[in-house]
Amino acid sequence: AQKITQTQPGMFVQEKEAVTLDCTYDTSDQSYGLFWYKQPSSGEMIFLIYQGSYDEQNATEGRYSLNFQKARKSANLVISASQLGDSAMYFCAMREGLDSSYKLIFGSGTRLLVRP
Amino acid sequence: EAQVTQNPRYLITVTGKKLTVTCSQNMNHEYMSWYRQDPGLGLRQIYYSMNVEVTDKGDVPEGYKVSRKEKRNFPLILESPSPNQTSLYFCASSYDYQVYNEQFFGPGTRLTVL
C-alpha cells in the first residue's frame, strides 16, 4: 500500500486565489512527521512546512498552512493568495522511525499551475 | 548562509568510469542522506548516515557507495556507473534522525550515464 498518496496529478488556480493540495498517509507509528516540499522547474527541493503527529494545532508558515486531520490521516497543504511563482511540483512527505531508516517517504506529487 | 551544496550540478559520463558526487552541509547536522529522483518512481533513498562513520543502506543502494569521515561531508561514489543510474540525485541533511526534523536538500546533481 502507498504510504503517501497525492491524488491530484495536476491543478490550476487563478492568481490571488487559495488552493488546497491533498495528501493522505498511512502509518502505524505513533510518532511521525509530515512535510511539504516545493520543486520548481529548476529542480531544487524547497522545504515549506511541517506537522508533527502530536501537534494539536495546524501548522502555518506565511501563506502556507497545513490542514492536519489525524483521524482521517490527511495532511492537506493550503496556499493562500496564490502567486505566479507558486507554479511548481508539490510533494507531501512523511518521516517515520527506525524501520524506515528515518528517511522521507514522498508522494507522487501535484503539479500546480497558477494562471494570471 | 545555511546550506547543502552538491558538486557537480550536471555530469555526463560513460559506462564504467568511476565518479564521485560531493555533498557538504554547514549546519552541523548529524543525519545525511542521498536520494535519487526518477520519473514515475519518485524519490527513493540510496544511503543514509546517522553520524560520522555510521552509514547504512536505503531502498536502492546497489551500485553506490558512501562514506562519512567528517560530519559535514557525505560523498556518493559510483564505482562503475551504468545507464540505469541516470537520474537526478539529491543530498539532504537534518539536525538529527528525529522524525520531526525537516531535511534540507542540496540543489541536485543531474547525472547522465551513456
Image (cartoon, coloured by chain):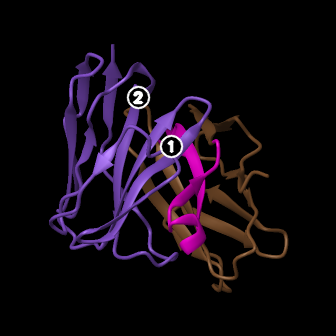
Q: What is the number of the mark on residue A86?
A: 1
Q: In the picture, which chain is brown?
A: A
**Crowd tier of the residue under label 1, counting other residues whose Cα lies within 10 Å: few below 14, some 14–19, many 20 or above:** some
Q: Is residue A96 magenta?
A: yes
Write the start and end of the magenta stretch as one range: A81-108
Q: Amino acid at mark 1?
A: Asp
| Marks 2 & 1 on one chain | no
Q: Which residue is mark 2?
A: B85
Viewport quadrant of the C terminus of chain B: top left
Can you tell which quarter of the image residue A60 is in?
Answer: bottom right
Residue furthest top as drawn: B114
Viewport quadrant of the N terminus of chain B: bottom left
Q: Is residue A72 magenta?
A: no
In the depicted structure, whether residue A56 falls above or below residue A42 = below
> x, y percentage for residue A17?
65, 47
The secondary element bearing badge 1 is classed as helix
Mark pair 2, 1: CA separation: 31 Å
Q: What is the number of the mark on residue A70?
A: none
The secondary element bearing badge 2 is classed as helix
Q: Residue at x 22, y 50 (%)?
A: B75
> x, y percentage for residue B95?
34, 75
Nearest the viewer among B35 and A84 is: B35
> x, y percentage for residue A69?
78, 72
In the depicted structure, whether residue A87 falls above or below residue B31 = above
Taking the image as shown, residue A98 lies to the left or right of residue A40, namely right
> x, y percentage for residue A66?
64, 66
Nearest the viewer among A33 and A87 is: A33
Q: Amino acid at mark 2?
A: Gln
Chain of the residue under the numbered disc 1 shown in the image: A
Residue furthest right as drawn: A72
Q: Colour of chain B?
A: purple
**Crowd tier of the residue under label 2, counting other residues whose Cα lies within 10 Å: few below 14, some 14–19, many 20 or above:** many
